[in-house]
Amino acid sequence: MDKIIIEGGVPLKGNIEVSGAKNAALPILAATLLTEEKCIIKNVPVLRDVMTMLRILRSLGVKTQMVGNKVIVEPKKCKSYIADYKFVSTMRASICVLGPLLAKKKQAKVSMPGGCIIGQRPVDLHIKGLRALGAKIKVEHGYIDARAKQLRGANIFLGGAYGSSVLATSNVLMSACLAKGKTLIENAACEPEIVDLANFLIKMGAKIQGQGTPLIIIEGVKKLNGATHTVIPDRIEAGTFILAAIITGGDLIIEKARADHLSALFDKLKQVGVSITVRGDTIHAKRKAAVLKPVDITTLPYPGFPTDMQAQMMALASISDGISVLTEKIFPDRFMHVSELNRMGAGIFLEGASAIVKGVKRLSGAPVMASDLRASAALILAGLVAKGKTEISRIYHLDRGYEKIEEKLQKVGAKIKRVKE
Ligand code: UD1
């Protein structure tokens, strides 16, 4: 198993490029199951989760080819409708093949994803949405077994205890494209990745309105065609690089980014004392003052502050001058990084679904363990600013969501390397 070693204390300087968004690429790849024609998806990040999705597509009989960041999908020979436990257990996002398989194959059998380290991961909204479209769904032997001779448009309120759901919206949106009649998804997720998926579906011939708002309206069509699409930039990777510039007191030009997807982060960074300049698709991030101010954050569905940036923001808050409160309203147990940051000298304690972060003057390098994808990113940020050496083990989580992160950070001056354990 690989680990990452960082020698902290180097301010990062230079230009760094953002890859395509993992969370847009995964449902878009799944959406190719809705057609029999060839699809070309560009700007797909080379990540473990993307490889898992391609393996699932191949296990269903789909032909896939990845050349650099371009994926060519030929779904014509998709024969199976079963997404096996061995894939779904390694990547929860595998659930997004459920909707397209059901709509195209009239049946789908997808392993229940189960929980994960960041907490419970229920699928009730996926099931509720597809049932509303007329699917008969049984959950047995660890699988969601869905069938429908013909899906029918419906009015669906897709809200749960924690608000909207990104992948449930994706699943219902994809199925509704081939349903008979009109579907209204109320309380739909508004994340940019949903907009990107809808834009791809529209290129395939789907009739969709309202993507990016809580009301999506879909007029079902009989058939979808192949399409070519370029995936949007990854806003979480861009946000992580912005924080890397700030935490190290550096100066980074983040290229190929979408600043308009990062408003909640920018708003909070203004309070911290940071200079952010946007020009076209580049974001220039640097620290304004020697000392960072504390910040209070509550994670919320988009356009609120993203839960996928909470851990990285906590790394930043841990060296600010004062007390910050970070409250998690999407995944209340998503705090596995707290004890690892504390091992590096941070002063964080948990109070329910909030982390109280008492800023310290400096973090010190230590051996730490990554527990999940965004926690790994937080530990990298902490390692970049800590005094001395930080060794991060279990970094396979990182490879699920950050393309060539150590190479990208090395180019802007970070003393970071990957070694075999
Ligand atoms: C997606 C993202 C993930 C991000 C999350 C929240 C992908 C591949 N992953 O995950 O990176 O952290 O959105 O922005 O896009 N919920 C239910 N019932 C359901 C489904 C979800 O109660 O059927 C709850 C969840 O437990 C959570 C909240 O809804 O509390 C939001 O989760 P959801 O948006 O579904 O997350 P994912 O789509 O799985």
Image (spheres, grey):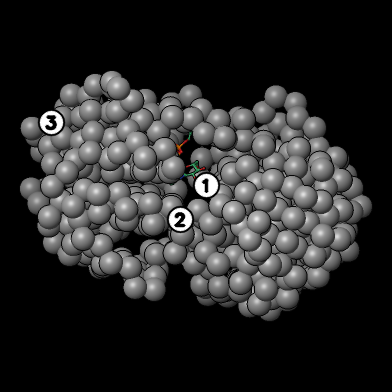
Q: Looking at the image, is 151 positioned above or below residue 321?
A: above
Name the residue: 69% across, 41% down. Answer: 337
- What secondary structure is found at the residue carrying circle 2? helix
In this picture, is 217 found above or below 224?
above
Label placed on residue 48: 2
Q: CA distance from mark 2 to mark 3?
A: 32 Å
Q: Secondary structure at mark 3?
A: loop
Whether label 3 touches label 1, CB < 8 Å: no
Mark 3 to mark 1 CA distance (whole Å) = 34 Å
Quadrant of the drawing holding the C terminus: bottom right
**Residue located 21% across and 60% down the image:** 63
Check the image and name the residue furthest to the front: 421
Q: Position of residue 345 (x, y in %)?
A: 86, 45
Q: Is mark 2 in CB contact (under 8 Å) with mark 1?
A: no
Which quadrant: the N terminus? bottom right
Residue extending farthest right = 361
Query: Is 263 placed left or right of 366 in the picture?
Result: left
- Per the model, the C-alpha gap separating discs 2 and 1 is 27 Å
Instruction: Identify which residue is drawn at 43% across, 29% down.
Output: 114
Q: Quadrant of residue 90?
A: top left
Say whether disc 3 or disc 1 marks the residue closer to the N-terminus: 3
Taking 343 as reference, is 116 above or below it?
A: above
Rate crowding at label 3 as few (under 14), some (14 to 19) or many (20 or more) other CA atoms within 10 Å. Answer: many
Q: Quadrant of residue 232?
A: bottom left
In what element is the residue under mark 1? loop
Q: Position of residue 109 (x, y in %)?
A: 23, 33
The answer to whether residue 358 of the structure is visible from this angle is: yes
